[in-house]
Amino acid sequence: MSIRDEGFSALLEKFSAATPTPGGGSAAALVGSIAASLVAMVAGLTLGKKSYQAVEPEMRRVLAEATKLRDELLELADRDSEAFNAVMAAYKLPKETESDRAVRAQAIQTALKSATEIPHQTALRCLRVLELAEIVVARGNKSALSDGGAAAVLAEGALQAALLNVAINLASLSDETVKLEYSRERERLAHQAQAKRAAILERIAKRLRT
């Protein structure tokens, strides 16, 4: 069953179970989806308010994009589990003959690349959620500042969690060029997210003082 279709209690039971999936990558995507939902909420709470008429077009765009990101991140939560299951299946392939071992090795590397790319995509979307959170915190409904801040904190945490899943899969990849590209991208995303979160929290503090 898709994470989207699970009841919350049942979903927590699945995350608590002593099974590899759903794991940290799926949790990262799920939390990112919650962060996107909060951004959408703040944008929605800004619409229709007289004092925020000037930013209505921008807030409508934010609402639409945040909703899209919410759905994409939910899909990535499922895909992350599927990707890890594929890695485990590849490791279980026969290795009796040289041909078996070659097929198995290739299958493992292919599955690992997918298992690396999916949390990378989660991190990219979480960074975009942070960028949208910055917009609603700067110009959205002041009464919902805490919700925009919560979105930012959750999105940054989800991004960092996703990058941990990138890192653990990189350790088993044999393609050094691919490993280097992902490592550089992982470092870039981590630094950008940290800086963005700090800027958003500072913006909240300034708006609360005015």
Image: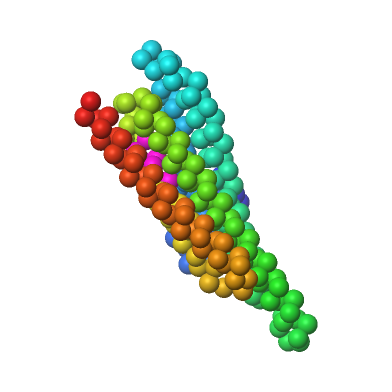
- Left or right of 77? Residue 9 is left
Q: How far across and how far down the image is residue 2, in percent?
A: 59, 49
Q: How is the image coloured?
A: rainbow
* Residue in the image at 37% along x and 50% along y: 194
- Rendered position, 7 above or below 83: above
- Rendered position, 102 above or below 31: below
Magenta run includes residue 137: no
* Residue in the image at 42% along x and 36% along y: 133
Looking at the image, the residue that sits furthest to the top is: 50
Looking at the image, the residue that sits furthest to the left is: 209
Q: In the depicted view, which residue is nearer to us: 87 or 198?
A: 198
Q: Quadrant of residue 54?
A: top left
User: Which residues are drawn in magenta?
Assistant: 148-155
Q: How far across and how far down the image is residue 150, in percent?
A: 35, 40
- Left or right of 16? Residue 143 is left
Looking at the image, the residue that sits furthest to the bottom is: 97
- Left or right of 160? Residue 83 is right
How many marks the image carries: the answer is 0
Residue 33 visible, this orientation: no
Q: In the depicted view, which residue is nearer to us: 75 or 159?
A: 159
**What secondary structure predominates along the stretch shown in magenta?**
helix
- Rendered position, 97 above or below 83: below
* Residue in the image at 33% along x and 45% along y: 198
Looking at the image, the residue that sits furthest to the right is: 99
Residue 190 visible, this orientation: yes
Q: Tell me the quadrant of the picture where the C terminus can be found.
A: top left
* Residue in the image at 65% along x and 66% along y: 111
Q: How far across and how far down the image is residue 143, in percent?
A: 31, 26
Q: How far across and how far down the image is residue 18, in percent?
A: 48, 67
Q: In the depicted view, which residue is nearer to us: 190 or 85?
A: 190
